[in-house]
Every structure is written in structure tokens, then in C-alpha cells.
Amino acid sequence: MRPYTQMQVGFAPRLAALYAGLFITGGIQLPFFPVWLKAKGLDPQMIGLVLAAPIVARMITVPLVARAADRREALRAAIIGTSFLGVAGFVLVGLAEGAWAILIAYTLAALALTPVMPLAETYALKGVAARGRAYGPVRLWGSAAFIFGTFLAGFATDTLPARYLIWLIAGASLLSAIAALALAPLSAATPPLSEPAKPRQHLLRDPVFIAVLAAASLIQASHAVYYGFSALEWRGAGLDGTAIAALWALGVIAEIVLFAVSGRLPPLFQPSVLLMIGALGGALRWAAMALDPPALVLPWLQLLHAASFGATHLGALGFVARHAPAGQSATAQGYLAIALGVVGAAATGLSGWLYGAFGSHAYAAMVLAAVAGGVCGYVAHRTRRVAAL
């Protein structure tokens, strides 16, 4: 038992380091990659198209890599391999010149990058479940690192030419790849289950699973205008990079608080209920943003990120963790990642046209996406309750 105990002690810090690397990258990329694209001469429509590029990558690589990881029980190896390929992808993007060259390079980078997160989430959910720990308190370190990355990029935009931002992203992705190397092999660290899991029908024939995929993907896709154009909108309104980073950080802090208490939430907050809470938070948030609120209101709206993103994320992952058949955890996460990617990329591509045509009023379309996701969450909730009777 002693060797297992030693590995157990180091599991959470190693996993937290991986999340930190991944989310430092995201903290730089999400708010400020569009700023880099604009500095490279891309217009809003082309920015939306580039940001939508991962749709093809998710559909191709995520199911292939996830199934291979499930069959070979090679989650750690898959995370390491895709992480280092992602570093190479960002270097390729940084060297690209011209809108179409950037689009092609970013698509190639996405082929490597898109499997990393669903693989990491599968690794995390398996590991924390085996140790009787909650997912949220470990995942919050990723959110904290996201704040660091956002402030780092915000400071960089105030002191360096925007065309150098891509190298911050590439460097941060290297940190996550190095952290992946430190992960313990999951099979060696995970004790055997006391009894085999009950077989379930194929995931894509399960109406509740499909409803949850639709709910999560629509609610998360409602962030498309925010992710793609909030930094540009706020810079145009006179906010500097540090102020923009602070606004993004405030939303993530609210998310961290939710993750920290997620293990203590009452049983009422089951995954489908969290999805509906996320939809409500998103609808309220984007309706207010569509009215072009003054800067003093923005911090209060950012607090709704705990609902629109945080509750939706916990609801979707919580459902997948409980519902995936034995031996299909990574595959189930892959299906979720594909749904999030397809719907999110479509919304991102559309957001470029909407923002170019309507400015901040484009958020009104995001209200509709959040409401539609809430309806799907309610269908999943009702269908599961009826099936249990």
C-alpha cells in the first residue's frame, strides 16, 4: 500500500500544474488572440472565421484520439503527445503571414490542441473519483492560472506591439506540455473498482445524453461574441489592456468560487439543474451586454460568468462522469468536446458577421442561444426524472 499512497499524495498537485499550464495559455489566448489577429490585418469577418477553425479539428482528431486512449488506456501518453504537437502548432501560427496562411496554420494547430482538454478532463475525473475527491477544488487552479495569463497578456498589450502576443501563447503552451510530462500513469495510480459498472446503451442513442450535449454546447456557444470581441469592444471604448484583463479576471474569480464550493453543493444541484442555472445566467448576462452598458456595470455582469460558464461546465462534466459506460470515459468526453466545438465554432463564425454588422447588439443573438440551451437542459432533467420513475 505504501507505493500507492506516495503516488496518491502527488496526484492533485501534478494535475493542478497541468491545469495551470493549460489555462495560462487560455488566459492569454481567449481575450487577446483576436487582438493579435487584428494587428496582423484581419477584419472582423476573417477573425471570426479563424476562431471557428477548430470545428474541423475537433470532428477529426477528438474522436480518433479519445477512442485510442480508451482502448489502450493511454490517457497520459495522449495528453503528452498532443500537448507538444500543440506547441509546434502555435509556433507555426506565429510564423505565418497573411490571413489565409494564418487560417491554415491555426487549423493545423487545432488538430493537435483540441484533444488535450477532453483527455485532461477524463484523466482528472477518473483520478479524483478514485481518490474520493471533488473535481471543482482541483480544477479551480486552472481558473486561477487563467487570471494570471489574462493579466500577463493585458500588461503585454500595454507595453509591447500586439504582433508579439502569439509568442506568449506559444510559451505558455510549452509550460502545459512540460506539466503533462509530470503526470503519473493513471492506471498505476488508480485502484481497481470494487464492482464492474452496469452496461448502458450506446451513448449516441441515449436521448438524455444528447439533450445534455445540446444544452452544454448551446450555452457555452452563447459566449462567442464575448470571447471573440469583448476585448476589441472595450479597447474601442477606451479601456486599456490591464482594465480588460481585470474584467476577465473578475469573471474567472466568480467561477473559482463556484468550483471551490462545488463539492459541498446540496444534492438538489444535480448536473441538469446546473445546466439550467447556466442558461439563466447566460441569458441575463448577454441581454444586459446587448444594451451597451456603461463601464461601471461591467464588473457586475462579469460575476455572472460563474453561472453562464462555471455552472454549465460543472453540469456537463458531472453528467458525463456519472453517465459514461465503463471503458468509454474518454469517448464520452470526446463527444462532449465535439458538440462544444461544432456549435461553438458555428457561433464564433457567425459572431464575426454579427459583430461587424451590429456591434455590441450582436449579444442579443447570444441570448437566444442561452435560452435554447436552457430548454435542452430542462428536457434532459425531465427525461431523466421520468426514466427514474
Image (spheres, helix red, strand yellow):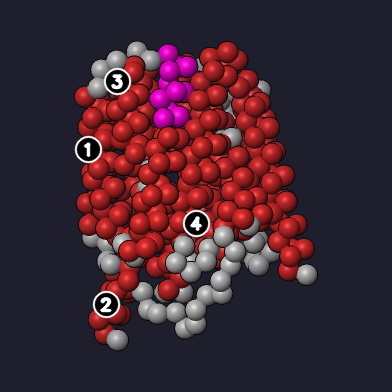
Instruction: Give the secondary structure at mark 3.
Output: helix
* Position in image of residue 354 (x %, y %): 57, 19
Between residues 7 and 329, which one lies in front from this camera angle?
329
Between residues 388 and 311, which one lies in front from this camera angle?
388
Question: In the picture provided, is 233 more to the left or to the right than 184?
Answer: right
Please say if 177 is above or below 364. Answer: below
- Which image quarter is the N terminus in? bottom left
Which circle's residue, 2 or 4, is located before the other in the chain? Answer: 2
Which circle's residue, 3 or 1, is located before the other in the chain? Answer: 1
Residue wearing tag 3: 101
Q: Which mark is residue 6?
A: 2
* Position in image of residue 80 (x %, y %): 26, 53
Q: Is 240 included in the stretch rendered in magenta?
A: no
Residue wearing tag 4: 332
What residue range appears in magenta? Answer: 43-53
* Quadrant of residue 46 within the rendered picture: top left
Label 4 and label 3: CA atoms lie apart by: 33 Å
Chief secondary structure of the magenta portion:
helix
Residue type highlighted by circle 4: Ala
What crowding class fits label 2: few (fewer than 14 Cα within 10 Å), some (14-19), or many (20 or more)? few
